Amino acid sequence: MKKYLLKGLFLLAISSFIRTVVCQVYTPLNLDQIYKRYEFLPYSVSALNSMADGEHYSVLEGENRIVVYDYQTGKESDLVFHADRFPELRNKGIDDYTFSRDESKILLITGQTMIYRHSYKARHYIYELQSGRLSALSDHEHERLATFSPDGSKVAYVYENNLFIYDLDRDMTTQITFDGEKNRIINGAPDWVYEEEFGLIRGFCWSPDSRRLAYMRFDETDVKEFSFQIFGSLYPEDYRYKYPKAGEKNSEVAVKVYDTESKCTLTMDTGPEQDQYIPGIKWTASADFLAVIRLNRLQNAVDVLIASSLNGECRILYSEVNDRFISEINDEYIYFTGDNGYFLIRSERTGYFHYYLYSMDGRLINPVTRGNWEVDQLAGVDEQKGLMYYTSTEESVLQRQLYSVKLDGSDKKKLSRKPGHVEAAFSKTFRYYINTWSDAVTPPVISVHRSDGGQVRLLIDNNELSADIKKYGFSKKEFIRIPVSGDLLLNAYMIRPAGFDTAKRYPLLIRVYGGPGSQEVLDQWDNDLPWLQLLAQHGIVVACIDNRGTGGRGEAFRKSTYMQLGRLESEDQIAAAEYLSGFRWIDESRIGIYGWSYGGTVSLLCLARGEGVFKMAIAVAPVTSWRFYDTAYTERFMRRPKDNPSGYDDHAPLNYAAGMNGRLLLVHGTADDNVHWQNSVEMADRLIAADKQFEMFLYTNSNHNIYGGNIRFHLFTKLTDFVYDNL
């Protein structure tokens, strides 16, 4: 009864809305604009960094100029670097840069060549502001992860899996590891699975006094290799790298500390267990103590160790156990204060992500935040004022608003002023922050604010893009809630065609991701919106539903899919499609679903398990069996295959090939290092065996993102045509 009452109220609201709409003629969208000329990408600010005084910030302009501006006035304070003045950089462009702490030097990054999702090789130069001298960091062709020491006298970097330190004062380079070898030993950089699943970018860090360099050593000798071919020559090249699939052996990780004065290296005692993860290391305020995060293989028990850099001994500072898994161990997990007086830890012990204040002896002082809502991002800690800045879901799970709170948990203040999605980047003195705001129909607006939330001035308004949105008649993104199981309501949005008429019947395309902890239904600008609007202009209703297992709604909702990935996600999407098909203006015979990566997995399951609900599905780079995917991600949610064989097999798309009834398009990149195209090839084999017709398209040498050159335009032409032809 409740289901039909809600549906009736929704229809009444829509009818009222339609009566108020004035018919307008809009300029039609086309794929050339979206994926060739990228006319709907918003402007942003490139490589913005606060200067030490907290009154100025620097930005990279035109890929060749580093300019300093005043937060308050917006006036240009200084042009600190111009690449065109140096022959070795002229016409090359700068990809990124960092200042030394005293801002006397700049480390310049140019010629980036991507390795995986985050990692890259590049050429690095050091520019000395006072002398105007530019010098190459090394004689190597490409270095990785170059980082100034806190005093600016040294730069540490990785080259061919070994760590080096360049002493600027002595103009001397010291190699501190010698056993680095491709597909065997990595010093100072993460292996593939740590980079992808823990977001670990750099595997080393300088001590506060610049004397010691802590680093991680990955021994991936016994990790099995995966290979794919790189095409383009008469004999394609085999690309081989270490990729631990679920249940297989991981790298063994050791934590070491190198002393630049004694030239000695010490190994930290992280315990006898080798089958574990070390997802992060971080110095405390003291150069004598290094924090090491230790996570068990099943990822349901975490310890924060304090390791002595003098003798390698470790003690446990903090521990937590969860009956399912510990979520989101990353750089925001723990924060140490500069005076070594206390630390902040993020935990979901109450069922929601919140921060807790602890003393350095491991004693809980107090919760900093609390409530039936989640802290989304730690924006900064002003230690002088004893304030923590963060964004959260307190007002709405669809939004992110900015708050400040005292570290004792009192005097919480909301700083953001309007509905939508906010991100904040604070100056080093916390007097100002750069505010990036958007909502579902407004591209990012970037502005300077005082720490009390008051706006100082506008940086970027993206007004031209906002005008284009009106010119091309973008339909409103309507947020709704869909009942699917008992009293459970799922958050969703819907985009209806301009000139929508309840007397007509429209096809429906559901866009899905649905992976653990993700969230697609947000009151935030989405760069995919122009394509969804293109579909709506062609008379297709577009919907998106955040199924069980997604984020923002607390631990119980987020972890409901534990040990059975694919089951509840597909059941929720099928139930949502059935609910939406009950509206008289949805043609229940023309419902499709589209997803990428995890969304591709869910799309396949929906086509197979939906019993005719879906006429078509598009699966881009899908996982078709969790046995094919990596250890850290898969085992976090499923445990190992030997612990949970039915969880791996009962809801694997591979095992549903015979039930695939409808039109199917499989798409994959042949150089996908993340979700191997093995997944789609094996799926195709099962479909053929089951005598199921389908379409399949491969993008040569493309990775998981499938982009570059004309590829995106070609891909979305393929996807769009498939939708038009089959809905």
Image (cartoon, rainbow, N blue to C red):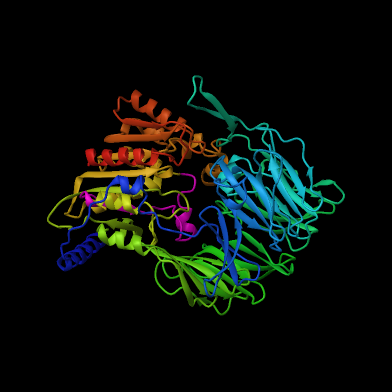
Residue 49 coordinates in the image, percent (x, y): 58, 62
- Secondary structure of the magenta portion, mostly? loop
Residue 495 coordinates in the image, percent (x, y): 27, 56
On the question of residue 588 being in view, the answer is: yes
Residue 88 coordinates in the image, percent (x, y): 62, 45
Q: How many numbered badges does the structure rendering display?
A: 0
Judge whether 698 appears above or below 327 on screen.
above
Quarter occupied by residue 113: top right
**Residue furthest to the top:** 234
Q: Residue at x 33, y 57 (%)?
A: 492
Judge whether 260 appears above or below 401 on screen.
above
* Residue 597 inside the magenta-drawn segment: no
Q: Residue at x 74, y 63 (%)?
A: 285
Residue 50 coordinates in the image, percent (x, y): 60, 65
On the question of residue 578 being in view, the answer is: no
Please name whichever residue, 84 or 644, is drawn nearer the observer in this view of the structure: 84
Q: Which residues are magenta?
A: 537-564
Residue 265 falls left or right of residue 240: right
Tell me the quarter of the image containing the C terminus: top left
